[in-house]
């Protein structure tokens, strides 16, 4: 899989070279490339933003550098005739869920457009959508200063699903949002007693049936308490 990220802060994406994403790149599972949007400006100040049409607070990213940056990326596909899916992180996007991570993990090529300020001129998305699939996605109901941290989160969620990435694929299936629509049950390890807090007896019983029932009950309790929306949803929509 190829992932191109366009940003005015390429340093923000440096963690992609570390740890697990770094290993995925060494193993050739993913080819991650970051691009500095300012390389596609032509004025002395390398301007990427301007005042909003119609007035109002803040600044908007001008379309021209984005057009040039996307043209340059499109000109070097991973394979001939492959087109990317463009992902635009924005607090006004569709909610990004685990099912979306699975869907994106099956794509050959993702391009992530990280906006700053009040966002990117909408014509960039509209122009791109005439040429490739485009998704504006949000991580949740809060506001980040730009798309970079969201892009990092999406990339990590996607590449850990690539075949051959995880040592133990079972831990993919069992975790929260892994398919049963429930949050994960609480987990414990040794020692059996720590600072006056004990591992629940059932987990030390060796009775696998009772352990499974206890975990299920804990997962349901937790989900009801923290994410009642997941229980109300139709099956599958919460994964
Ligand atoms: Cl994807 N972008 C920004 N800027 N803020 C966010 C977000 C994305 N998701 C939640 N807040």
Image (cartoon, rainbow, N blue to C red):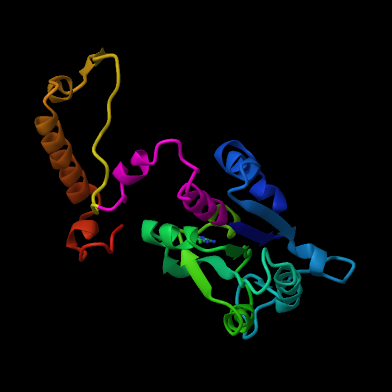
Query: Residue at (29%, 16%) from the top-left corner?
Result: 190
Between 123 and 174, the one lying in front of the other is 174
Q: Position of residue 93 (x, y in %)?
A: 47, 69
Relative height, residue 5 to residue 81 (above, below): above
Q: Is residue 145 magenta?
A: no
**Residue at the spot x=62%, y=38% of the render?**
18
Residue 98 vertical position relative to residue 92 in the rendered view, above or below: above
Count the marks: how many? 0
Q: Is residue 11 above or below residue 218?
A: below
Please identify the quadrant where the N terminus is shown.
Answer: bottom right
Q: Nearer the viewer, residue 97 or 229?
A: 97
On the image, the x and y values in percent for residue 10 come to: 71, 53
Q: Is residue 124 left or right of residue 95?
A: right
Q: Which segment is the magenta one?
A: 151-179
In the picture, the quarter occupied by the C terminus is: bottom left
Which residue is farthest right?
A: 44
Relative to 107, 66 lies left or right: right
Q: Is residue 158 magenta?
A: yes
**Residue drawn at (60%, 51%), measured in percent from left and top?**
30
Could you say where residue 196 lies in the image, as x and y percent from the top left? 23, 14
Q: Residue furthest front?
A: 80
Rendering coords of residue 110 (x, y %): 58, 63
């Amino acid at each position: 899989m190829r992932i191109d990220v366009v940003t005015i802060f390429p340093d923000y994406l440096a963690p992609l070279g570390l740890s697990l994403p770094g290993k995925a790149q060494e193993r050739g599972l993913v080819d991650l490339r970051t691009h500095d949007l300012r390389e596609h400006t032509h004025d002395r100040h390398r301007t990427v933003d301007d005042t909003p049409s119609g007035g109002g607070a803040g600044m908007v990213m001008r379309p021209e550098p984005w057009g040039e940056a996307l043209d340059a990326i499109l000109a070097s596909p991973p394979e001939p005739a492959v087109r990317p899916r463009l992902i635009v992180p924005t607090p006004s996007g569709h909610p990004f869920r685990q099912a979306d991570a699975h869907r994106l993990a099956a794509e050959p090529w993702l391009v992530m457009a990280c906006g700053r300020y009040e966002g990117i001129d909408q014509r960039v998305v509209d122009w791109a959508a005439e040429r490739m699939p485009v998704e504006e996605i949000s991580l949740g109901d809060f506001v980040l200063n730009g798309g970079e941290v969201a892009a990092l989160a999406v990339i990590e969620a996607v590449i850990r699903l690539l075949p051959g990435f995880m040592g133990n694929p079972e831990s993919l299936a069992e975790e929260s949002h892994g398919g049963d629509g429930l949050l994960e049950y609480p987990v414990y390890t040794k020692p059996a007693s720590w600072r006056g807090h004990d591992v629940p007896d059932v987990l030390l019983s060796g009775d696998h049936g009772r352990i499974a029932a206890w975990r299920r009950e804990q997962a349901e309790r937790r989900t009801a308490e923290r994410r009642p929306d997941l229980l109300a949803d139709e099956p599958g929509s919460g994964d």
